[in-house]
Amino acid sequence: MADLKIRVFNGDDSNPETTVTIPCGVLKIASRLIPKQAASALQEKGIEIDELVRLADHPEARGTLVEVQEHKKNEKIVISLE
């Protein structure tokens, strides 16, 4: 099982402003602790938390899963399994 990483980039920066790492061992539990508002925001962007947890169980699922460009906010969010 891989760690889930969420990186937030501002503008054209190549270094993330924020990185959140959820270790593989607590991913299933942590997914249940995500506030409903945050889960809804992810779902609006087509990101299903339960699917991320399922993918983390598969050893061949590695790398970038989702990249969201927020053009109005000049922000990019990258979700990956590492």
Image (spheres, rainbow, N blue to C red):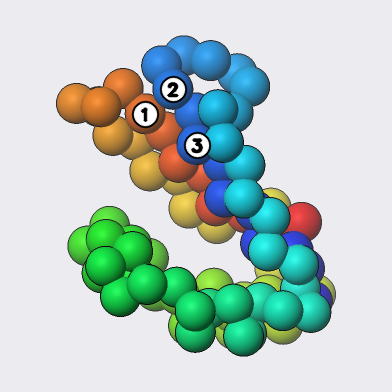
Q: The C terminus is located in which quarter?
A: bottom right
Amino acid at circle 2? Asn
* Amino acid on which the number 3 mark rests in the picture: Val
- Going 19% across and 26% down the picture, which residue do you hit? 72
Report if the CB atoms under discs 1 and 3 are less than 8 Å apart. Answer: yes
**Residue 46 in sight from this viewpoint:** no
Label pair 2/3, CB-CB below 8 angstroms: yes
Q: Secondary structure at mark 2?
A: strand
Spatial separation of the CA atoms under disc 1 and disc 3? 7 Å
Give the residue displayed 34% in from the left and 35% down from the top: 69
Locate residue 46: give its quadrant. Answer: bottom left
Q: Position of residue 80 (x, y in %)?
A: 62, 54
Question: Which mark sits nearer the N-terminus, 2 or 1?
Answer: 2
Looking at the image, can residue 24 be seen?
A: yes
Of helix, strand and loop, which one carries label 1? strand
From the image, tell me which residue sits under label 1.
75
Query: Residue 7, image x and y in percent?
Result: 56, 41
Q: Earlier in the sequence, mark 1 or mark 3?
A: 3
**Residue that badge 2 annotates:** 10
Q: Are marks 2 and 1 in contact (CB under 8 Å)?
A: yes
Which x, y percent locates residue 25?
A: 79, 79
Residue at x-position 49% and y-position 28%: 9
Q: Secondary structure at mark 3?
A: strand
**Residue that badge 3 annotates:** 8
Query: Looking at the image, which residue is at 57% across and 36% down?
Result: 18
